[in-house]
Image: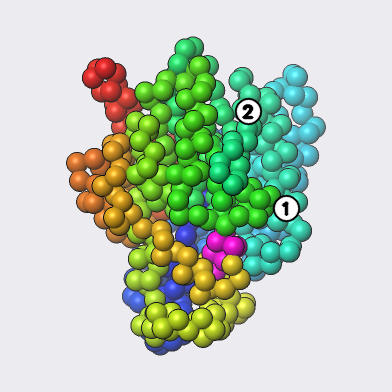
Amino acid sequence: MKLNKVTFFAFSAFCSSLLASALPSDMKQYTKHESKNATMLQLIPDVDFNYNVLATMANAPYQGSDIGEILVAASQIKTGDFESFYQAYYDLATRVHKQAEAIDCKKHPVSARNAFFRAATYYRSADAFLHGNWSDPRITLLWKQQAGAFNKAMELMPIPGRRIELQADNFTVPAIFFKTDRPGRRPTVILGNGYDGSMEDLYHVMGEALLQRGMNAIVYEGPGQPSVRRYQDLGFIPEWERVVTPVVDYALSRDDVDSSKVGLMGFSFGGFLASRAAAFEHRLAAVIALDGIYDFSQTIFRQFGPDLTKLFEAGKKNEVDEEVAKVQNNPNVPSTLRWGINQGEWSFKTHSAYTFLQKTKAYTLEGIVDKIKAPVFVGDGQNDMFFPGQAKELAEQLGGRATHHLFETIQGAGQHCQVGGYVLMNQVSLDWLEDVFANQTKRE
């Protein structure tokens, strides 16, 4: 599981190096780890694999993983070898799953629950680099395995999570409702992931933290995201309000939800999706963007070299696809770059890099940011490798509606999506949310 980092920047920079014979200086971190400039603990040489290992470890505070067993798995991963990444995590997942099944869940429900949660996480992690081959049966098999383990874990919660399917216009929105143990109508936060992460991930990122604070949590997925891409064969859509509005409808239909205190959180690319939805869904009391993104497409194209950009702007589809294929099919290219292409084409449902890039141009808040009415918490990782400057741009465009918070590297939360610093991330963002809800109560 990659917790939704978007590595298009790296891929774009590499294409630039192919065509313009120069890798931008701010992109050199993607191809070589320099210890003197390190801003992230380097456990294994492969930068992208290392990020994924840290992202999985980051779930540990909320029962989504355990550090020691991940370190053992990481030692089995070979630089640039997607199959070794799969095998290391699949072996770990099956081993932990067997441990979970062997526990007497009636006598030791907490132990069984935590083991099932960890197994589910590791099955998702094993899937991370498989999307270059859409017909790989493991893509579906792993998802059934992770969902099965996650379901068993939810059954052992004090109040079991409930899976639901919500009707949108021409698709359905899978979601899970997690109910707090506090009585009455409670504040509720809808959690959405981004480019590659799952709704199950979000329970460990923020869902449990919300339950601890007496709030309900709803996690969901839309087109382009794991279960909808697999089972409904739908790629990303820019009109994300079509996804979020049915979830808001559902939340407001429940007698344990305070209709005046419904928030929306977007994680990674989900920070853009949540902001986009909030421009049209005005029943939201607050929005949390972790991290903030104003213009997804702009961020990608800014990293392209002039030659490839000119080819794209001239409509040279075949030429663009051919140049990108040189990266995509070269096993010697850093895994970050190959994954960025594979995941982009898979999640946007196209085998053409040109078409993928064309589709991304619709993912901007330009012209609609003024429609956002709710207050927005804009998270910003000091050393965000994937969306540098985007959070600040979103905050500036929102003006007084935004609270911009810089998560610093020295705090251990300066990476994209605050990987490794979820406890601090939740402390800051959810304290802000509680204050927003409290001020709203005073106004009422």
Q: Residue furthest front?
A: 169
Badge 2 element = strand
Left or right? Give the position of 214 relative to 439: right
Q: Identify the image quadrant of residue 282.
A: top left
Q: Which residue is mark 1?
A: 140
146 or 226, which lies in front?
226
Q: Amino acid at mark 1?
A: Thr
Q: Residues within 10 Å of mark 2 (few under 14, many from 20)?
A: some
Report the residue at 41% width, 65% height from top. Answer: 361
Residue 442 in view: yes
Report the residue at 49% width, 27% height from top. Answer: 251
Q: Identify the image quadrant of residue 260.
A: top left
Task: Examine the residues drawn in magenta and state their main secondary structure.
Answer: helix
What range is drawn magenta here?
341-349
Q: Identify the image quadrant of residue 308.
A: bottom left
Badge 1 element = helix
Q: Which residue is mark 2?
A: 162
Report the residue at 51% width, 85% height from top. Answer: 319
Residue 45 point in image, percent of width and height: 53, 66
- Residue 344 part of the magenta segment: yes
The C terminus: image quadrant: top left
